Image (cartoon, helix red, strand yellow):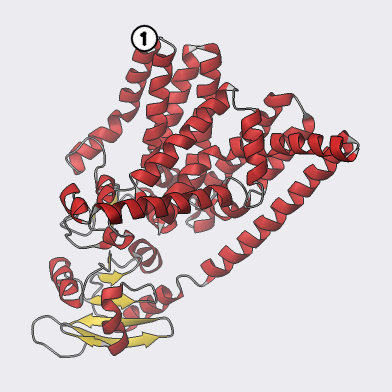
């Protein structure tokens, strides 16, 4: 959904439709019409990056170009960071190649979504912040705050980076630098705030804050639910604490699988401790701690469903450098124990680490590409059926509205996590005619999917992996 969302919004910009969403993908901030104002939950930067390339090539692959370029710049930054640690050419190449083959995150780095831009803007922000802490030069903190704002315009989590940068001049007792930073943030965010005031009637997006009160991830797709602190407390302390503990465990596993390349986590810990006092790593590990606590304690359910993985991308260059340093520390220790030639052993184990990274990366690419290859087959089939049989292109209720629109150009709404009666309310409110259910259907609609009938809905066609229903208003039972 993330990728399709930003691809579609890039197309909207490129084709002159502006910041409009031709679908509704959640009900946290309900638009009265389709299309409605965009970016009430997600941020605009990836769409702005993709739009010019849609004009050039009008293809998904061409829209990937700016994200691939940012991924290359991330590799360069990581290699440079490794060089600054020890002026070691082997560190430079090992870090650069580890970022080229960076395990389970590699498949996402060239997609037109938040991963690559947040990784690059966030990493640049952390690196510049470390340089500022070391030198207190104002231009460095100004550049860092601009990078943090770009990261925030990519993902809402970037607000943590903005807050981190704002604190640095105060910790250095640099009042003028702090005022400059505040002014830079205000000027940089002014256009975004004006857009929000005009379209959403608030300065910054607020829909995402409702996810603080989720009691299950599926509540994100609940229609007109009361997501508030009152209903959250009613859930009970036992359930709340259990959800936080479960999220902590899940998020630790995400750290291991993404920053630790699955198998390099011990090396990252050893290396991270070894270089813990370097300014850029002090800032980076501070961000890691702040991010982990925020995701685990506040945004508990979204954190383990992709949010934490995306936000950790800014730490990739720092994690890779920590792995490289940690590998050297371990090899030096082992060489003393076993009488190895230390320099030769470091080369051998560096090559071995790269081989492991390549294997993990190839497997991750293979697994994801196989899944993505047929991910939207049902939408292609349903789109063709609607072209052949439907007389109007009224909205369709689907599990992934951005992907459905990208494939069919038909307006869509997300299937709410509700019963068939509530689906009728949604259909009537937005003049929707169709309901397309797939294996990812909400649990309350299981009976409808199995039986093929419910009050207000009639099955009209089935495919191997999905069923299409027609909305029958009132008591009518007529066909198409």
Give the quarter of the image for residue 331. top right
Q: Which residue is mark 1?
A: 175
In the rendered structure, the answer to whether residue 469 lies left or right of residue 289 reads left
Front residue of 5/303: it is 303
For the image, the number of numbered tags is: 1
Q: Nearer the viewer, residue 53 or 201?
A: 201
Return the x and y of residue 269 as percentages of the image width and height. Answer: 62, 38
Q: In the current view of this chain or complex, which residue is farthest to the left?
A: 474
Residue 106: x, y in percent? 59, 52
The image quarter containing residue 76 is top right
The reply to whether residue 268 is visible in this rendering is yes
List x then y, in percent, for residue 334: 82, 39
Horizontal relation, residue 230 to residue 284: left or right: left
**In this rendering, is residue 361 above or below 85?**
below
Q: Secondary structure at mark 1?
A: helix
Determine whether 368 is above or below 461 in the image.
above
User: Which percent across, then down, holds residue 3?
Assistant: 44, 56
In the rendered image of this protein, does residue 205 appear above or below residue 181? below
* Residue at point 82%, 38% (across, down): 346
Image side of residue 68 versus residue 355, left or right:
left
Horizontally, residue 116 falls left or right of residue 7, namely: right
The C terminus, quarter of image: bottom left
Quadrant in which residue 193 is drawn:
top left
The image quadrant where one finds the N terminus is bottom left
Residue for point 57% across, 55% down: 107
């Amino acid at each position: 959904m993330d990728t399709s969302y930003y691809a579609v919004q890039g197309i909207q910009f490129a084709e002159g439709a502006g910041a409009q969403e031709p679908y509704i993908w959640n009900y946290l901030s309900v638009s009265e019409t389709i299309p409605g104002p965009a970016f009430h939950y997600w941020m605009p930067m990836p769409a702005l990056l993709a739009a010019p390339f849609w004009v050039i090539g009008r293809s998904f692959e061409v829209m990937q170009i700016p994200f691939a370029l940012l991924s290359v710049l991330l590799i360069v930054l990581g290699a440079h960071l490794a060089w600054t640690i020890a002026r070691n050419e082997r560190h430079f190449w090992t870090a650069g190649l580890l970022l080229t083959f960076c395990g389970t995150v590699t498949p996402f780095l060239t997609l037109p979504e938040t991963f690559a831009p947040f990784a690059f803007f966030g990493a640049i922000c952390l690196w510049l912040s470390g340089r500022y802490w070391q030198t207190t030069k104002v231009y460095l903190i100004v550049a860092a705050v601009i990078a943090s704002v770009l990261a925030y315009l990519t993902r809402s989590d970037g607000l943590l980076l903005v807050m981190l940068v704002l604190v640095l001049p105060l910790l250095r007792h640099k009042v003028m630098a702090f005022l400059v930073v505040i002014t830079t943030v205000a000027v940089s965010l002014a256009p975004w705030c004006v857009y929000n005031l005009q379209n959403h009637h608030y300065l910054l997006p607020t829909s995402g804050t409702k996810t603080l009160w989720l009691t299950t991830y599926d509540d994100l797709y609940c229609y007109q639910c009361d997501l508030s602190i009152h209903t959250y407390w009613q859930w009970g302390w036992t359930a709340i604490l259990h959800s936080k503990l479960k999220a902590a465990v899940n998020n630790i596993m995400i750290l291991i699988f993404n920053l630790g390349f699955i198998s390099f986590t011990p090396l990252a810990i050893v290396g991270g401790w070894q270089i813990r006092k370097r300014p850029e790593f002090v800032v980076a590990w501070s961000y890691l701690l702040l991010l982990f606590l925020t995701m685990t304690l506040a945004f508990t359910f979204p954190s383990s469903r992709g949010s934490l993985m995306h936000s950790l991308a800014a730490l990739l260059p720092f994690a890779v450098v920590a792995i490289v340093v940690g590998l050297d520390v371990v090899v030096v220790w082992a060489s003393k124990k076993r009488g190895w030639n230390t320099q030769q052993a470091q080369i051998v184990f560096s090559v071995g680490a790269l081989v492991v990274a390549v294997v993990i990366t190839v497997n991750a690419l293979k697994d994801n590409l196989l899944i993505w290859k047929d991910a939207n087959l049902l939408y292609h089939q349903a789109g063709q059926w609607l072209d052949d049989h439907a007389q109007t292109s009224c909205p369709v209720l689907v599990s992934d509205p951005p992907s459905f629109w990208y494939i069919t150009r038909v307006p869509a709404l997300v299937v709410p996590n509700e019963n068939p009666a509530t689906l009728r309310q949604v259909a009537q409110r937005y003049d929707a005619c169709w309901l397309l259910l797939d294996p990812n259907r909400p649990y309350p609609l299981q009976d409808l999917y199995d039986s093929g009938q419910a009050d207000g809905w009639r099955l009209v066609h089935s495919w191997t992996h999905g069923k299409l229903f027609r909305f029958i208003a009132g008591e009518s039972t007529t066909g198409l």
